[in-house]
Image: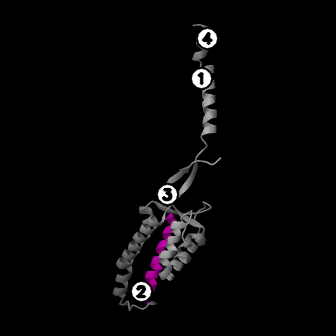
């Protein structure tokens, strides 16, 4: 073998023409193609509505299977009053479901089915204060203002990060947990 052939077979000594070509390609790709920006795929209005409706069905099932039968066995009837024991317990079930599921799993069963998850805007873990503000106080505002509930939920459709009033209260949002959006980087 001649000296030129031996040198070209060495892995540490690539051919000069190939090296220059690769460097030109790398420089061109960095300049011509800016790095894409990955942004969260925020959960939109309709996805969140369907998840919420599923959660309401789960809560109704919990109340129907556990709360109402226990009160019938005990002999406490639901007199239909707003502050009856049964109504208070079902209200506690409603709020406890959202608070506990969001705190420990970051999502309710409805959100799990639709691939949604609650996150803080600072990407921190969901703390108790955040969850209580979002799920207890924020949800109470939505529930207490029955007439305004639908318009309040419409806020989700028109905010950039798809936040509801309760998200603004707790500095949170809802994202699709398995997807991100790829946007070209601005120069």
Residue at screen point 45% across, 77% down: 94
Q: Secondary structure at mark 4?
A: helix
Residue 14 appearing in the image: no
Q: Nearer the viewer, mark 1 or mark 4?
A: 1
Q: Is residue 103 magenta?
A: yes
**Is most of the magenta stretch helix, strand or loop?**
helix
Mark 2 or 4 closer to N-term? 4
* Residue closest to the eye, 77 or 5: 5
Residue at screen point 43% across, 67% down: 51
Mark 1 or 4 closer to N-term? 4
Residue 168, x across and y down, in percent: 59, 70
Q: Secondary structure at mark 2?
A: helix
Q: Nearer the viewer, mark 1 or mark 3?
A: 1
Q: Secondary structure at mark 3?
A: strand
Mark 1 or 3 closer to N-term? 1
Give residue 18's mark. 1
Start and end of the magenta stretch?
Answer: 84-109
Q: Nearer the viewer, mark 2 or mark 3?
A: 3
Q: Label 4: which residue?
A: 4
Q: Label 2: which residue?
A: 86
Relative vertical location of residue 59 with respect to residue 18 in this rendering, above or below: below
Q: Is residue 176 left or right of residue 64?
A: right
Q: Label 3: which residue?
A: 177
- Mark 2 and mark 4 residues within 8 Å of each other at the beta carbon: no
């Amino acid at each position: 073998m001649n000296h030129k052939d031996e040198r070209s077979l060495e892995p540490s000594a690539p051919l000069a023409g190939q090296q220059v070509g690769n460097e030109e390609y790398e420089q061109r790709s960095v300049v011509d193609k800016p790095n894409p920006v990955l942004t969260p795929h925020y959960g939109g209005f309709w996805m969140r509505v369907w998840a919420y409706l599923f959660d309401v069905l789960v809560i109704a099932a919990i109340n129907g299977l556990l709360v109402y039968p226990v009160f019938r066995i005990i002999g406490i009837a639901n007199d239909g009053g707003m502050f009856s024991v049964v109504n208070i317990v079902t209200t506690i079930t409603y709020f406890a479901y959202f608070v506990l599921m969001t705190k420990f799993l970051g999502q309710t069963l409805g959100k799990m089915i639709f691939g949604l998850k609650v996150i803080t805007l600072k990407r921190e873990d969901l703390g108790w204060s955040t969850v209580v503000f979002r799920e207890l106080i924020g949800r109470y505002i939505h529930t207490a203002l029955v007439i305004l509930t639908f318009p309040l939920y419409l806020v989700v459709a028109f905010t950039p990060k798809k936040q509801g009033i309760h998200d603004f209260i707790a500095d949170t949002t809802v994202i699709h947990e398995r997807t991100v959006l790829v946007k070209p980087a601005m120069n």
